[in-house]
Each structure stands twice: as structure tokens, then as C-alpha cells.
Amino acid sequence: VHIQRTEGCDHMTCSQCNTNFCYRCGERYRQLRFFGDHTSNLSVFGCKYRYLPERPHLRRLVRGSVCAGKLLIAPLLLVLGLALGAIAVVVGLFGLPIYCLCKKKRKRTRTGMPWPVHMYLLEDMKE
């Protein structure tokens, strides 16, 4: 199938198989949220004519380094997020009830209201 672009961007769609591809390099369009897409300059899936077309070795080195950095940092960020989430849960489970009790006690002392006395304590005091 002969493809001719008259105007517009480099994003093409095959009319027979519905495949998305780049007009300039002929590669399929791939898109992963974390790694970028074919139009990203620093993505490993990026078009070879978009970023340093005259220096392919440097382009591969830069794109590979960016990809490796993302692969190394992603697990660290995941562990950090899980640790912060666990700390927030622990603080919420133990700190929040203690905070509410202290706030309630402070409010009662300011208004002059005594702490509630249970009926069984009153009966013990009468005897």
C-alpha cells in the first residue's frame, strides 16, 4: 500500500488494518503512561527523527538512561508511598482516638462539666 501525506502531522492510520504508525520512520505508535509515547523526545518509544536524528548512538544512550532511571526509581517511590501510607494508618488508628479524648477532656474542664459518673459508682458511694 502506497501512503502519501499531503498535510498534517506524522500520525498515520492504516485503512486496512487500523494500525497507527509514524509517517517519518514507519514505526508503530506505542504508548505507555509511564514511559511516554512516539511523540515524546526522551521516550524509548519516541521517533528517531524527533530527537537527535543525526546522532543515533547519543539518542539511544540518553533515552536508555532515562528509561533505566524510571525503572530504578519506580520501585523506590512505590515503597516510599506504602511506608507513608502505613505510617498514616498507624497514626490514624492510635493518634486520633487519643486526640479526641484529650480534646473532650479539655472541653469539659473549660465548661466546668464533670466527667460522667457511672451509676454503679454512685451506689458504691451510698453504702
Image (cartoon, grey):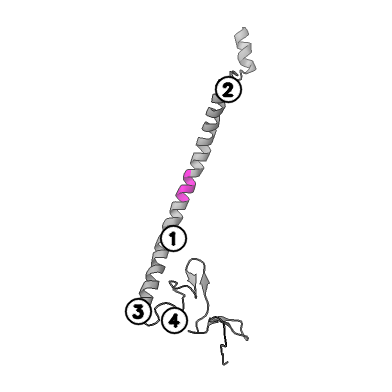
Residue bearing mark 4: 49
Residue in view at x 52 percent, y 28 percent? 102
State the extent of the magenta-drawn residues as a range. 82-87
4 or 3: tag closer to the N-terminus: 4
Residue bearing mark 3: 57
User: Do the residues bearing badges 3 and 1 touch, measured as CB atoms within 8 Å?
Assistant: no
Spot occupied by residue 88 in the image (x, y as percentages of width and height): 49, 44
User: Do the residues bearing badges 2 and 1 touch, measured as CB atoms within 8 Å?
Assistant: no
Spot occupied by residue 49 in the image (x, y as percentages of width and height): 44, 81
**3D distance between C-alphas at marks 2 and 1:** 49 Å
Q: Is residue 2 above or below residue 71?
A: below
Q: Amino acid at mark 4?
A: Tyr
Residue bearing mark 1: 74
4 or 2: tag closer to the N-terminus: 4
**3D distance between C-alphas at marks 3 and 1:** 26 Å
Which mark's residue is nearer the viewer, 4 or 3?
4
Q: Is residue 38 left or right of residue 116?
A: left
User: Do the residues bearing badges 4 and 2 touch, measured as CB atoms within 8 Å?
Assistant: no
